[in-house]
Amino acid sequence: MARIAGVDLPNKKRMEFALTYIFGIGLHNSRLILNAIGMDFNKRAHEVTEDEAAAIRQEIQKSYMVEGDLRKKVAMDIKALMDLGSYRGLRHRKGLPCRGQKTKTNARTRKGKKKTIGASAK
């Protein structure tokens, strides 16, 4: 089982898709990484040798911010928006959508469960 950037890659997946299990690496970056080290996209994760895994680790460490560092950066960016008092920061603070979606009928994911107002309890 290949372990890269603190993530166990699924054994049966092809490497180009297995690398996308790492936070911060999508399909495009995964293909760029495999091209940079000269590895076949179709190789399965359980077929990767230690040398190839080390090369992948080195390439990711050299060129990409992933996992914990990236999560911390995203959280700090959102916190900076909130501290600044920008519109997006206020939307984050209130738990509402930040990217222009309508909220009259949708946005249940961000707003949470419906709160019934005005219903009298008898």
Image (cartoon, rainbow, N blue to C red):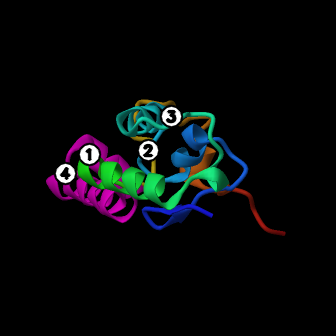
| Amino acid type shown at disc 3 | Leu
Q: Earlier in the sequence, mark 1 or mark 3?
A: 3
Q: Is residue 96 left or right of residue 46?
A: left
Seen in the picture, residue 71 relative to 36 is either above or below; the reply is below
Please name the residue that numbered disc 3 is placed on.
Answer: 27
The residue at which mark 2 appears reads as 25
Residue assigned mark 4: 85
Residue 83 in the magenta stretch? The answer is yes
Check contact, mark 4 vs mark 2: CB within 8 A. no
> Residue 117: in sight, yes or no?
no
Quadrant of the snapshot with the C terminus = bottom right
The residue pinned by badge 1 equals 63
Given contact means CB atoms under 8 Å apart, are the residues at marks 1 and 4 in contact?
A: no
Q: In the image, what residue occupies the spot 44% across and 57% down?
A: 51
The amino acid type, in three-letter code, at marker 4 is Gly
Nearer to us in this view, 55 or 83: 55
Q: Earlier in the sequence, mark 4 or mark 3?
A: 3
